[in-house]
Image: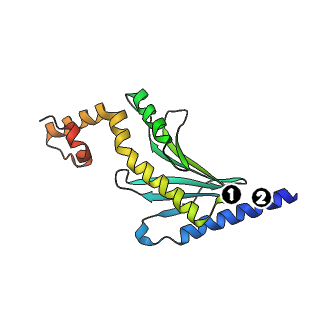
Amino acid sequence: MTSRGKAQGGARETAEKAFLDWLDGLSDEDGVTHEAGARAGEYVVTLPGERKLKTTVSVIVGDRAMSVSAFVIRHPDENEAAFHMWLLERNLRLPGAAFAVDSDGDVYLVGRLPLEGVTVESVDELMGVMAATADESFNELLVLGFFSSMQKEWDWRISRGESTRNLEAFRHLLDRG
């Protein structure tokens, strides 16, 4: 192994330790769960939320960086241009993370820290950005990309006397009566 390879290995171990120290510093009240991922060096962390009840983040400590990726919402059913414009405008204000779209059009939140920058504090900040951004964006993205489906669901539930509890956050937009 070259000296550069040894240095990268040491940086990876240091970064992974900082990440694990962050996990160890959490309490049960934080509501964060984690498990080993399917890939080498991957951890799957579930962060609690309010609007989006949970955000599952894949964390990979690689040879050069620690990367994070979280599914936010599926491809929009409608209003695609405004939906994607909202994502791009929001990217301008995100610290350390950005929205991305996969080949199916599903939306993810991604971030990357160089190994040298991975500390307990930087992991905490990045995971906070991931949780807050996914949670704070969720309802807006639902309205932009799925409003017609939400309206149909609301109208159907009202007509049948069914509970509208899961749509209450949108009552002001959906209740026509």
Place of residue 83 in the rendered image (x, y in percent of width and height, measured from the top left):
41, 33
The amino acid pointed to by label 2 is: Gln
Left or right: 143 as drawn, with respect to 38: left
Measured in 3D between alpha carbons, the distance from the residue under mark 1 to the one under mark 2, in whole angstroms, is: 8 Å
Residue at image location 21% in from the left, 45% down from the top:
164
Check whether the beta carbons of the residues at disc 1 and disc 2 lie within 8 A of each other: yes
Residue 160 image-quadrant placement: top left
Amino acid type, mark 1: Leu
Residue 91 image offset from top left, x and y in percent: 50, 41
State which tag comes first along the sequence, 1 or 2: 2
- Of all residues shown, which one is farthest toward the right? 2
Of residues 106 and 172, the one drawn nearer to the viewer in this rendering: 172
Residue 1 seen in the current view: no
Residue 55, visible in the rendered structure: yes
Can you tell which mark lies on residue 8? Answer: 2
Question: Dot 1 lies on which element?
Answer: helix
Crowding around mark 1 (Cα neighbors within 10 Å: few <14, some 14 to 19, many 20+) is many
Q: What residue is shown with label 1?
A: 115
